[in-house]
Amino acid sequence: MTYTWATGTEIGLIRRHNEDSVWPRHEDGSGLAAGKAEGVFVAAVADGMGGHVGGEVASHIAIDTATGIEGDAKTRVAAANLALVDAVRQQPRLAGMGTTLTVALFSADGEVEIGHIGDSRAYLYRKNKLRQITRDHSLIAEMLEAGELTEKDAAVHPYRSVITRALGLDRTIDVDRFEIELRDGDRVLLCSDGLTGMVKDKSISRILDGHSNPAEAVSALVEAANAAGGADNISVVIVDLST
């Protein structure tokens, strides 16, 4: 299996600092990175919280830990969580920091296993159809599921950024796990809510359809989020499978 990938993370138009992190990432930690991998491949996105220092530190620790060890997706997410808790214990000034984390492990035989916590997302784009794989761990998602809120109201709800699960807040966490058997031509998208909060799924699908090159698709998605207001940091990972 060949995985052709691209990643990008950008500050957006409103925030003063970028608290997101992606993997693989550019050498300087920002901008666009791209490449190819044969066999096993790991990709991830994290959206930090807790202010500039805390949020940036949290997302980088989570990404570096999860991608730097062996193990399945849940093991990697759990290890990232413990690394954050330990960092706070050693540096009390970081108390309150946390992060989302979505990790995708691509196998040599074309399967992807995803470990997930928070409101960053993983999507599968197959035959021009976009499907969200992960479930948002957010107050809004819970209210939508309970029928307490409409999609229209959710878009402007004052608590739309409140998440109900994150790394770094407790030693014990509940990690979601998903496993998908990929097909030739499939595309996996990981992203922070800086993209999905600005660009609707239908528009994301159109952009993916219009850009077969992963690097061009990443750039187009980031540009679309900024064009819609760029209210948050924007991070995008795209991985294409070919046999």
Image (cartoon, rainbow, N blue to C red):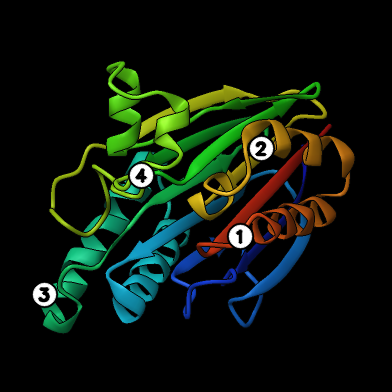
Task: Estimate how packed mark 1 is, as few (under 14), some (14 to 19) or many (20 or more) residues with alpha carbons within 10 Å.
Answer: some
First in sequence, mark 1 or 3: give its number: 3
CB of mark 3 within 8 Å of CB of mark 2?
no
What number is the disc on residue 188?
2
Disc number placed over residue 160 in the picture, else none: 4
Sequence order check, earlier mark of 4 and 2: 4
The CA distance from mark 4 to mark 2 is 25 Å
Q: Residue at x 35, y 41 (%)?
A: 157
Asked which secondary structure carries label 4, the reply is loop
Residue 114 placement, left or right of 236:
left
40 versus 128 height, above or below:
below
Give the alpha-carbon distance from disc 1 to disc 4, as whole Å: 16 Å
User: Could you say which disc has been placed on residue 229 in the image?
Assistant: 1
Amino acid residing under circle 4: Arg
Q: Reading the chain from its start, which is encountered first: label 3 or label 2?
A: 3
- Front-most of 106 and 132? 132
Q: Earlier in the sequence, mark 1 or mark 4?
A: 4
Residue type beneath disc 1: Gly
